[in-house]
Structure formats: C-alpha cells, structure tokens
Image (cartoon, grey):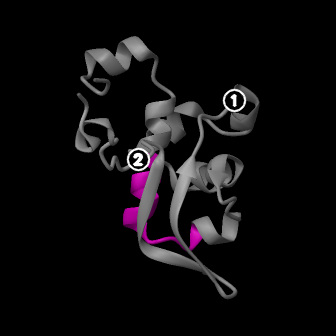
Amino acid sequence: MTTKAATEQPDVQPLADDNTVTLDTPIRRGTTTIDSITLRKPASGELRGVSLVELLQMDVASLIKVVPRISSPSLTAIEVAGMDPADLLALSSKISGFLLQKSAKTDASLVA
C-alpha cells in the first residue's frame, strides 16, 4: 500500500548555475535592471586579441574585451567598464576557471 506522501516528489529547488554571478551592484539598462550575469566557456576564437596571461592575471582591459563576448545577458564594453570592481572580480574568477584543464582544477581542488 502506497500513501500519497510516499509518491509525492519533494520540492526541490533547482541548483544555481555555477557560471552565474549575482551582482552586488546591479547594472541599469534603461528601465531594465541586470542583477545576475551568466558566463559561458569561451571558444578559442572568442579569445582572439586577448593575452591569456593577462586574462589569468585578471587584467581589466582584457576582461572588458572578453566579458561582452561570453555573457548572458550580453553586456557592452561600456557596461563592463562601469561595473563594481567586486562584481568584475567575481566574473574574472569564473573566466579564469574556464581556462584551466580539468586535471588542473582537480589538482587545485576546484572540482568536486
């Protein structure tokens, strides 16, 4: 005999995307407020014109070039340049993680 409680699925909250950064200081775009940014792993061509070393060193000029190419919603270079430094640092750490091989992430205990 099965009870109703045993057949119901528990309320499960979807896990937050590991590549999403909630902004401390939301970006205003007209009447829209952007309070989180999702980044995707860039393809090699999207890194064209940017030094990988500078990107790993969290160089602001490099980030201003790359973030608009891989962000959702898509940001402009001007919006990235005007971001709160803490938010830019959070995005930068996600981008740095994209550049590491899986074995390097495991060695650094960045992967579960």
Mark 1 lies on a secondary structure that is loop
Frontmost residue, 45 versus 38:
38
For the N terminus, the image quarter is: top left
Q: Nearer the viewer, mark 2 or mark 1?
A: 2
Queried whether the magenta region covers residue 91, the answer comes back as yes
Mark 2 lies on a secondary structure that is loop
Queried whether the magenta region covers residue 93, the answer comes back as no
Residue 42, above or below 32: above
User: Of the residues shown, which amino acid type is indicated by label 2?
Assistant: Pro
What residue occupies the far front of the structure in this picture?
A: 1
Q: Is residue 58 shown to the viewer in this render?
A: no
User: Of the residues shown, which amino acid type is indicated by label 1?
Assistant: Ala
Question: What is the C-alpha distance between the residues marked 2 and 1?
Answer: 27 Å
**Where residue 54 appears, x then y in whole percent?**
52, 40
Q: Is residue 63 left or right of residue 92?
A: right
Q: Is residue 65 left or right of residue 11?
A: right
Q: Is residue 79 shown to the viewer in this render?
A: yes
Task: Please say if the residues under marks 2 and 1 sit with CB atoms less than 8 Å apart.
Answer: no
Disc sitting over residue 66 in the figure: none
**Where residue 13 appears, x then y in whole percent?**
36, 50
Frontmost residue, 46 versus 18:
18
**Where residue 67 appears, x then y in whole percent?**
62, 52
Task: Count the numbered circles shown.
Answer: 2
Q: Is residue 105 left or right of residue 5?
A: right
| Residue that numbered label 2 is attached to | 14
- Asked where in the image residue 8 lies, by quadrant, the reply is top left
| Residue that numbered label 1 is attached to | 43
Please tell me which of labels 2 and 1 falls first in the chain: 2
Q: Residue at x 28, y 23 (%)?
A: 112
Q: Which residues are magenta?
A: 81-92
Residue 103, above or below 14: above
**Where residue 36 appears, x then y in whole percent?**
50, 63
